[in-house]
Image (spheres, helix red, strand yellow):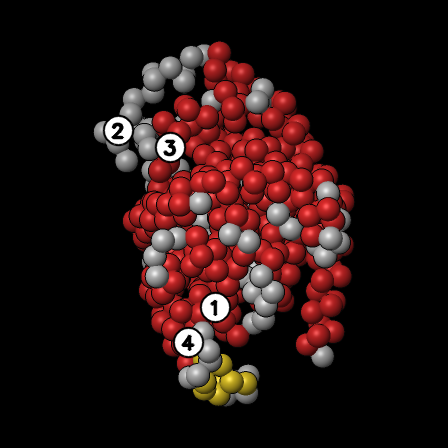
Amino acid sequence: MLESLTQLLVSIDDFVWGVPLMVLILAGGIWLTLRARCLQVRRLPLALKWMVKNEEGGSGEVTSFAALCTALSATIGTGNIVGVATAIWEGGPGALFWMEVAAFFGMATKFSEGLLAVKYRTVDEKGHSLGGPFYYIEKGMGANWRWLAKLFAFFGVCVGLLGIGTFTQVNGIASAVQGFFDPDLTHMVNVPIINTEHSITIVVSSIILALCVAAVVIGGLKRIAQVSQIIVPFMAVIYLVFTVLLLICNISEIPAAIALIVKAAFAPKAVAGGAIGTMFIAMQKGVARGIFSNEAGLGSAPIAAAAAQTNEPVRQGLVSMTGTFIDTIVICTMTGLSIVLTGAWKVEGLEGVQITTYAFQNGLPFPAQLSSFVLMMCLVFFAFTTILGWDYYSERCLEYLSGGRMGAVKVYRWLYIAAVFIGPYMTVKAVWTIADIFNGLMALPNMIALFALSGVVAKEVKDFFESGKHLDKLPDRKGI
């Protein structure tokens, strides 16, 4: 029964992430890159500067940096550690190449999402900033497209509850914790609800995680932003330090690894002897996991961007764009290179976080236990903040669907916490397949809107830079 369900999910996933959707997302990124005049290259230094320099006098609930951290909290997670590993495991080293291609054009997509989120956001009577694809679809494309906005919001709730927000993150945490504390499954306990045996580390970690999530999400956006501003930069720096060290220790292997990645992107069979499959599979897994990680085109990040304290849509678009750069161009690239140069991707019997763990254990000049512990802690905190960020996203989607009824949102929070609790008991394959399906369904209405509003994006960019507003004329606060 379980095997049949898994096969059904795989079939749906293959259909959703078929050629049409991948072409739509990549073509959207290319089109927006052209409309914005390759802004992700020309204006990246300015974007990185504004990333840590908040605008004074802007309306919104949280600073631009806090909004970015909330968005990064939802993107820097298992996708960077587990998602990259599964992409390379299923699609070969070439999947990393296509992940980078999607991320490059995805920066223009993410810029456009952030810009439109601020331009079309609304503020309710309580000073509550509301924005995202459902608002720029409804207000930008017109009331006749409200059905598309509601469709996006519905899929957004599903992604949070059944996809990126809960199952994949918690499953990744549980796998990492079990792999470190009980790799041989010597301490087993029967779980009455599902009547199966699991490591006691899984049970304990699911309870602790559910309680921690409950303690934060009940406090709403400001508490989520406060926690994210502390955890995200701290853990990102630690993870980068260790991955950079791994690459330095194996620097002589990097050229061969890069050559293998490029070769496998176009000729996977020549690399793996047909075991990996076709170029389409490498592209499919790379693009799908890349979007899972950086969420460009998904429409999630603009929900956080809409709460930023800014009066300039273009400025917030640039800040939002840095999220994709940090998440995929920097962090995912380092993870992928670590996996390829250590050969972890072709070790039989490994899946998910085990692949990245193998890379850390065999690539770092430390005892295997220490390397495993560092990776486990990074994964735990990354995934925890992703859970928090996606609770916020899905709550906003539900708020739009329910017409602002907070009673429905409060009920949803408890369902979300329950999903966090049961997530560790899901199988890895099923979890990631479900996440991929809902990601694709959520991306579809958002990409339609981005194509429709690309003219608005182009005009805003032209007017902003021609007016000279980027020349440090906006008053800034003293820093972060």
Inspect the image, locate mark 1, and give the three-letter code of the amino acid beneath it: Ser
Residue 51 — which label?
Answer: 3
Give the spatial CA distance, label 3 vs label 2: 12 Å
Residue 326 in view: yes
**Position in image of residue 113 (x %, y %):** 54, 36
Q: What residue sits right under mark 1 in the picture?
A: 175
Residue 130 in view: no
Inspect the image, locate mark 2, and give the three-letter code of the amino acid beneath it: Arg
**Position in image of residue 59 (x %, y %):** 36, 33
Is residue 20 shown above or below 415? Answer: above
User: Disc 3 or 1, which lies upstream in sequence?
Assistant: 3
User: Disc 3 or 2, which lies upstream in sequence?
Assistant: 3
Q: Residue at x 57, y 25 (%)?
A: 457
Q: Quadrant of residue 51?
A: top left
Considering the image in quadrants, where does the C terminus appear? Answer: top left
Inspect the image, locate mark 3, and give the three-letter code of the amino acid beneath it: Met
Considering the image in quadrants, where does the N terminus appear? Answer: bottom right
Assign a secondary structure to mark 2.
loop
User: Disc 1 or 4, which lies upstream in sequence?
Assistant: 1
Contact, CB < 8 Å: mark 2 with mark 1? no
Give the spatial CA distance, label 3 vs label 4: 41 Å
Q: Quadrant of residue 203?
A: bottom left
Contact, CB < 8 Å: mark 1 with mark 4? no
Inspect the image, locate mark 4, and give the three-letter code of the amino acid beneath it: Asp
Residue 436 vs residue 455, the one in the foreground: 436
Give the spatial CA distance, label 1 vs label 4: 10 Å
**Position in image of residue 175 (x %, y %):** 48, 68
Q: What residue sits right under mark 2 in the picture?
A: 477
Assign a secondary structure to mark 1.
helix
Is residue 307 shown above or below 224? Answer: above
**Position in image of residue 361 (x %, y %):** 42, 59
